[in-house]
């Protein structure tokens, strides 16, 4: 198989260690807040906050909440679980305070930069980009903070183009931005259906980064196989997959 001319990546939990930063941020913030937020064990706090992020961020992607609204909803529901009622303004302030702890924990996965370096060595002239479901300004801030802006030629964000993964349109928009056909691009992401299957159905080479050993549903596994999705457990495996 010919090596791709363009390798596109998801951002959060693919290159950028989002879940680790979220976990560190909410643990630190709960410690600052004290009672009643200290009543749950650290793992329970992280699990609750993650579940609320999944629920309300997907409401934002679906257009049911705006970007600030999903932040307010996450803060309000987290506080309510601890018996605290927040107004919209209070929820915004609460989230802003949490956010500073989250930002302090921003980092790349350890295998991100070595993977980019090895791909560049194996595929001379390869170009890199990002496709992310999120707000362009917010995601750009993360990319710049961890130094990815020096490596990524383009950042395609659903909040800017008005189409979210796994819709084929956002993958097509990225390929158009690079001036390549989908067959000349690969896409790597940590969500099987949203990232890898979505990309493969759009004509790119879809790669699922399964860092945790997740077991997909029978339906997802069958669709991934039908679409030709490749599975890797870490980014160190990617160069050999794309340029054997």
Image (spheres, rainbow, N blue to C red):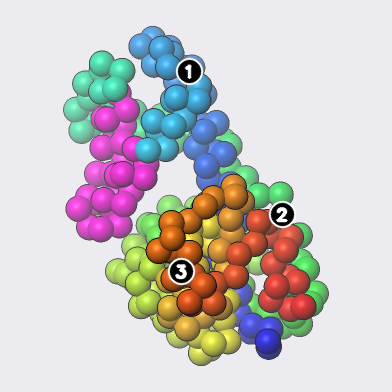
Residue ID for mark 2:
111
Question: Foreground residue, 183 or 157?
Answer: 183
Residue ID for mark 3:
222
Cα gap from disc 1 to disc 3, whole angstroms: 38 Å
Q: Is residue 74 magenta?
A: yes
Picture layout, residue 114 above or below residue 85: below
Q: Secondary structure at mark 3?
A: helix
Residue ID for mark 1:
41
Tell me the quadrant of the picture where the C terminus can be found.
bottom right
Residue found at the far right of this picture? 121
Question: Foreground residue, 30 or 208?
Answer: 208
Picture layout, residue 59 above or below residue 204: above
Q: Which residues are magenta?
A: 52-79
Q: Secondary structure at mark 1?
A: loop
Q: Which one is earlier in the sequence, the residue at label 2 or at label 3?
A: 2
- Specify few, some or many for label 2: CA neighbours under 10 Å numbering under 14, 14-19, or 20 or more: some
Q: Is residue 205 magenta?
A: no
Magenta stretch prevailing secondary structure: helix
Q: Secondary structure at mark 2?
A: loop
Residue 212 location (% of width, % of height): 59, 47
- Specify few, some or many for label 3: CA neighbours under 10 Å numbering under 14, 14-19, or 20 or more: few
Task: Give the label on residue 66, or none.
Answer: none
């Amino acid at each position: 198989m010919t090596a791709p001319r363009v390798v596109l990546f998801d951002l959060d939990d693919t290159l950028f260690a989002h879940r680790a930063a979220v976990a560190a941020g909410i643990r630190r913030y709960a410690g600052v807040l004290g009672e009643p937020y200290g009543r749950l064990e650290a793992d329970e706090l992280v699990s609750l906050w993650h579940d609320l992020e999944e629920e309300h961020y997907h409401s934002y992607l679906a257009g049911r909440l705006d970007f600030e609204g999903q932040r307010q909803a996450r803060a309000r529901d987290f506080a309510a679980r601890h018996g605290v009622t927040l107004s919209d303004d209070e929820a915004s302030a609460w989230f802003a305070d949490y956010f500073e702890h989250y930002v302090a924990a921003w980092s790349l996965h350890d295998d991100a930069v070595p993977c980019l370096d090895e791909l560049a060595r194996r595929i001379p002239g390869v170009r890199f980009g990002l496709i992310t479901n999120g707000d362009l300004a917010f995601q750009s801030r993360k990319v710049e903070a961890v130094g990815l802006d020096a490596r990524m030629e383009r950042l395609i964000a659903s909040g800017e183009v008005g189409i979210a993964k796994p819709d084929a349109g956002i993958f097509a928009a990225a390929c158009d931005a690079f001036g390549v056909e989908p067959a000349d691009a690969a896409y790597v992401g940590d969500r099987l259906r949203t990232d890898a299957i979505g990309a493969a159905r759009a004509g790119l080479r879809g790669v699922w980064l399964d860092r945790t050993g997740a077991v997909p549903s029978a339906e997802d596994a069958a669709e991934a196989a039908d679409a030709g999705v490749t599975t890797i457990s870490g980014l160190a495996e990617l160069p050999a997959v794309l340029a054997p």
